Amino acid sequence: MSNKLSLFFGPQHAGVSGNFNITVTLTGETIEDVRIHLGFLHRGFEKMLENVGFLQGFPFVCRINVMDPDHNEQIYAMAIEELAGIEVPPRAHYIRTLVLEMARLSSHLLWLNGMAGAMGFYTINHWAMLARDEILDLFSMISGARVYHIYILPGGVRRDLPDGFAEKMRAFLVDFENTLHDFDVAFFNNRVFRKRTDGVAVITQEEALRDGMTGANLRATGLACDVRRDEPYAAYADLDFEIPTRTEGDSYARSMVLREEMHQSVHIIRQVLDKMPGGLAWNRTPNPFKWNIPRNEAYVRVESGRGELGGYAVTDGSNRIRRINYRGPSLPHGLVVLPRLLRGMTVPDIAHVVSSLNISVPEIDR
């Protein structure tokens, strides 16, 4: 008689970051085999984009990554700008940088919510969501929306920053730095967190490069690779910031890189507010109902909260995208790396290993 057991982990399980299923084959509590099942979201946004006008596509691209929608807006806007030859004013570049770093903080706080919850640190879970809620209030002040902002548009941003926003942003940063200290004391420096993650789910730099990993998961293996520094966009070339790295490549290293990236985002936002130029926040674009872009193709990329996010777009002279494809960092992390890491581990490890990779399932199942 076989002593093996198949355990279905998700899509309803709180320890799975999104609508996907991990089927693990167990001997006792040891994981022997892993299968990832996708398709629960029933999407197809890239095909939908081929059937709408250029500006009508922005509500779709936001939903490619629910947790970090603004980087998808940035990719789509950059692609259209390169295809159509549209210039972006300096002020708009700075506002975009501000929005993207706010989005990075929001995304990382959602990661912290999941990582802490997977280990039973529910106080940290609530603190992270409270801090993120304050960021969403600031997003609402800018754009009128809390989650899907549709704020970055070809030629700049939808409207300039409202009066009083800079002061509210600075006040939030002061409070948030105190919250980051609380995270350190209660979570990152906690010996339970350290023992659960130190030496767990190790990825070497060679494995990371072979499997197409990017973002914090790659930087946790010692490689300081970041599109913001390697191929600057928006206003990043004018700003001073560090690329956090670790060398261990384990769950602890990945977590500490994300922790330090939150500190760096605070530093970047302060510089943006201090250096913000005057002028226009948007260069006028053609009538969206009569806007035909000549035959062209473009590939653009940014550093999203999860790693390198790329977009390849083709136009054919009509009033809509002929073909577009997003390259999301979550695909190699969730489909290639995760099954290999889980083999040989135990059931209690599943949730926090999944969280350590910071996977966005909507980005895979797009």
Image (cartoon, rainbow, N blue to C red):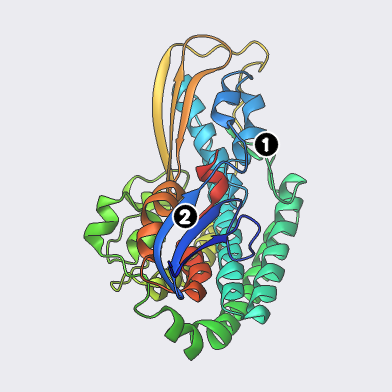
Q: Position of residue 39 (x, y in %)?
A: 56, 41
Q: Which residue is painted at 41% across and 54% down in the image?
A: 333
Label 2 residue SS: loop
Rendered image: mark on residue 242: none
Residue 306: give its label: 2
x and y percentages locating residue 10 in the rendered image: 60, 58
Is the residue 146 above or below the residue 253 in the image? above
Q: Quadrant of the N terminus?
A: bottom left
Is disc 2 surrounded by few (<14), some (14 to 19) or many (20+) residues within 10 Å?
A: many
Residue 128 position in % (x across, y down): 64, 71
Quadrant for the C terminus in the image: top right
Q: Is residue 228 visible?
A: yes
Residue located 59% across and 45% down the image: 70
Left or right side of 177 for 333: left
In the picture as drawn, the residue positioned furthest to the bottom comes out as 191
Above or below: residue 259 compared with residue 225: below
Mark 1 highlights which residue?
158
Amino acid type, label 2: Arg
